[in-house]
Image (cartoon, helix red, strand yellow):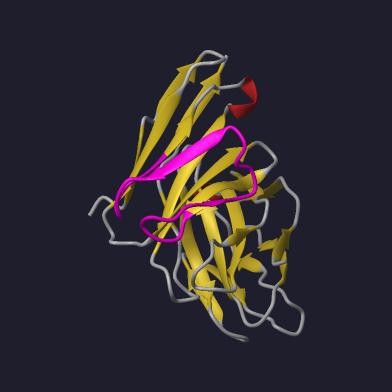
Amino acid sequence: NAGVTQTPKFQVLKTGQSMTLQCAQDMNHNSMYWYRQDPGMGLRLIYYSASEGTTDKGEVPNGYNVSRLNKREFSLRLESAAPSQTSVYFCASKLQGFIANEQFFGPGTRLTVL
Amino acid sequence: GDSVTQMEGPVTLSEEAFLTINCTYTATGYPSLFWYVQYPGEGLQLLLKATKADDKGSNKGFEATYRKETTSFHLEKGSVQVSDSAVYFCALSSSGNTPLVFGKGTRLSVIA
């Protein structure tokens, strides 16, 4: 049981390049989330998917797109990377339905945009 | 909307000191409350949680009590260790179908 996995762990991009961050969970969770973490800003929700086939914007969706490929996988795409997107990105998942269910987090992807 | 406010850091303590990290919340209904911990270079992991008023969550020597009258969920530990150095996040869930709402995090540094 690997929990939530993310690839890659580190990435350096040049301004304008595109890339996709991958996330997968093996806990049969229906809800998945993408956050970014910047120094002093805590976690900010980018997009989430409450269930397979649905996605919703979070607090900071501009410049990102997401795909819920199936129940296990939820990817985050940067179409044209900007230095302001330099951050640590975390994927999380949760079993929907019970208020006390915790969110499980992946180890993060550290992205630098030059 | 729902929100979580926690004390600003960083907090620096000597080993074996007493720790309190304050957390207050605003929410409709009866939320569940959580403390997450993030060790350097890692993702967040659940430290403890409480699901109703007066519940006490505890784990690894940390405790927090759900106080509905003061809308608080303060994190405490009687004797911190260097290995407790991390960022601590308070969070709430007011619905089983929406993301957790997180505070901004409090960085704790424990020095030997």
In the rendered image, the residue lying farthest to the front is A53
Classify A47 as above or below B4.
Answer: above
Classify A43 as above or below A52.
Answer: above
- Quadrant of the image for the C terminus of chain A? top right
Q: Residue at x 62, y 21 (%)?
A: A83
Measured as percent of width and height from the top left, residue B32 is found at 56, 75
Decide which of A74, B23 is in the foreground and name it.
A74
Measured as percent of width and height from the top left, residue B28 is found at 69, 78
Measured as percent of width and height from the top left, residue B44 is found at 48, 51
- Quadrant of the image for the N terminus of chain A? bottom left
Query: What kind of secondary structure does the magenta stretch mostly adopt?
Result: loop
Q: Quadrant of residue B10?
A: top right
Measured as percent of width and height from the top left, residue A98 is found at 45, 76
Decide which of B19, B35 is in the foreground and name it.
B35
Decide which of A62, A5 is in the foreground and name it.
A62
Q: Is residue B54 magenta?
A: no
Q: Is residue A58 left or right of residue B9?
A: left
Q: Is residue B16 left or right of residue A51?
A: right
Q: Residue at x 53, y 65 (%)?
A: B98
Count of number-bearing discs: 0
Q: Is residue B41 left or right of residue B80?
A: left
Q: Is residue A67 magenta?
A: yes
Q: Residue at x 60, y 77 (%)?
A: B31
Q: What residue span does the magenta drawing correspond to?
A: A49-75
Classify B62 as above or below A63.
Answer: below
Classify A60 as above or below A95.
Answer: above
In the rendered image, the residue lying farthest to the left is A1
